Image (tube, rainbow, N blue to C red):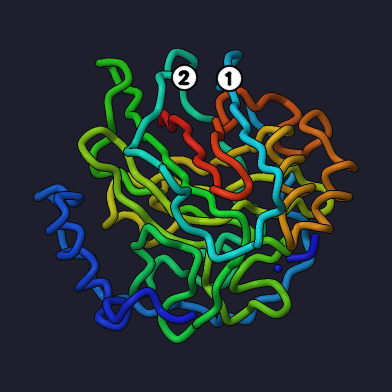
């Protein structure tokens, strides 16, 4: 595996002590939570690894989501990821809620959650929706086809599936070139395509990102960890679940064939399948994102996350 302008705003400089009041002002943090303290990054940023992005297997349910892939007649320009034009509010179906929890998967070798080198979860500014830009002292921008990621977290308990208000998700992915920030050559000092968001009263949360590459040996995917609260989302030992999200083949083909910057993904996709992938080969119905949109306008991915 090969691993691929400025700051969001000055709030990144004010620390996690500032992050929580911002979320509280938006009604995103339950009153019962304490303030997350200022914690330093506990390891160096320059971690070099050569392992692939995990080969653990999972157990999945039997029914999956559907896909709706829009197509465009013009190649995308590979700009900074942003919300697709015309995107509405948070909308997800009840897909997969009768099939149990989302499967546990490996986080791979590039999690930056403290289990393999750096722990970005303790960094000021990690709680953010737009993950296309690096924050803090880094200034890189991940370019590519815009992707809005809309997830709904559910608590699978004795009362059935109920929205998991206050749950936090840490999400990360590779960039258009297949590189992981904080690890891969050339982006060791960047931290883009990593962020934490908090579920609202409906269990809903959203990230602004880019469509990831298909790198050698893996099906296109996103990584994420689920935590019970934003306070818990500072160390991997507190996580409730680690899983991955798969992308529909037709959408991947459309993006890789029609958008600038994804040339290596075209050949890599032709050499892997969901049936041969080390993570999704034993089932992926609960992890297959539903995508709508186009190369020009960007895509919206939705998925339910029962834990």
250, 129: nearer the viewer = 250
Counting labels gives 2
Residue 296 image position (x, y, % from top left):
60, 50
How many neighbours does mark 2 have within 10 angstroms: few (below 14), some (14-19), or many (20 or more)? Answer: some
When the figure is inspected, residue 213 is found, relative to residue 182, above or below; the finding is: above
Residue at 32% from the left image edge and 20% from the top image edge? 161
91, 158: nearer the viewer = 91
Residue 305 image position (x, y, % from top left):
44, 32
Residue 209 image position (x, y, % from top left):
51, 56
Left or right: where does residue 287 sit relative to residue 15? Answer: right
Left or right: where does residue 87 sit relative to residue 39? Answer: right
User: What is the secondary structure assignment of the residue under circle 2?
Assistant: loop
Left or right: where does residue 90 sit relative to residue 242? Answer: left
Precedes in sequence: disc 1 or disc 2:
1
Residue extending farthest left: 31
The residue that mark 1 highlights is 64
Which mark is on residue 95? 2
Q: Quadrant of residue 284?
A: top right
Residue 143 image position (x, y, % from top left):
60, 66
User: What is the secondary structure assignment of the residue under circle 1?
Assistant: loop
Q: Quadrant of residue 176?
A: bottom right
In 3D space, how far apart are the residues under numbered discs 1 and 2 (Cα atoms)? 7 Å
**Split into 4 quadrants, where in the image is the C terminus?**
top left
């Amino acid at each position: 595996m090969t691993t691929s302008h400025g700051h969001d705003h000055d709030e990144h400089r004010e620390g996690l002590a500032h992050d929580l009041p911002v979320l509280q002002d938006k009604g995103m943090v339950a009153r019962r939570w304490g303030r997350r303290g200022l914690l330093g990054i506990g390891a160096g940023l320059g971690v070099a690894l050569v392992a692939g992005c995990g080969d653990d297997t999972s157990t999945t349910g039997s029914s999956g989501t559907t896909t709706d892939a829009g197509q465009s007649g013009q190649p995308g320009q590979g700009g900074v990821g942003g919300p697709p034009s015309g995107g509405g509010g948070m909308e997800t179906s009840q897909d997969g809620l009768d099939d149990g929890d989302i499967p546990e998967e490996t986080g791979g070798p590039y999690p930056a959650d403290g289990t393999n080198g750096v722990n970005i979860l303790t960094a000021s500014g990690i709680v953010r929706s737009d993950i296309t830009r690096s924050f803090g002292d880094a200034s890189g921008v991940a370019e590519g086809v815009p992707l809005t990621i809309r997830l709904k977290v559910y608590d699978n308990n004795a009362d059935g599936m109920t929205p998991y208000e206050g749950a936090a998700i840490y999400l990360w992915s590779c960039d258009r070139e297949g590189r992981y920030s904080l690890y891969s050559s050339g982006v060791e000092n960047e931290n883009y395509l990593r962020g934490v968001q908090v579920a609202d009263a409906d269990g809903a949360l959203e990230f602004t990102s880019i469509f990831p590459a298909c790198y050698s040996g893996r099906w296109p995917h996103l990584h994420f960890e689920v935590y019970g609260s934003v306070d818990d989302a500072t160390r991997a030992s507190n996580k409730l679940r680690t899983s991955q999200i798969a992308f529909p083949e037709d959408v991947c083909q459309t993006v890789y064939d029609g958008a600038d910057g994804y040339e290596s993904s075209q050949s890599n996709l032709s050499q892997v399948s969901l049936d041969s992938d080390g993570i999704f080969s034993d089932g992926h119905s609960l992890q297959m994102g539903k995508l709508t949109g186009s190369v020009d306008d960007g895509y919206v991915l939705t998925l339910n996350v029962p834990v």
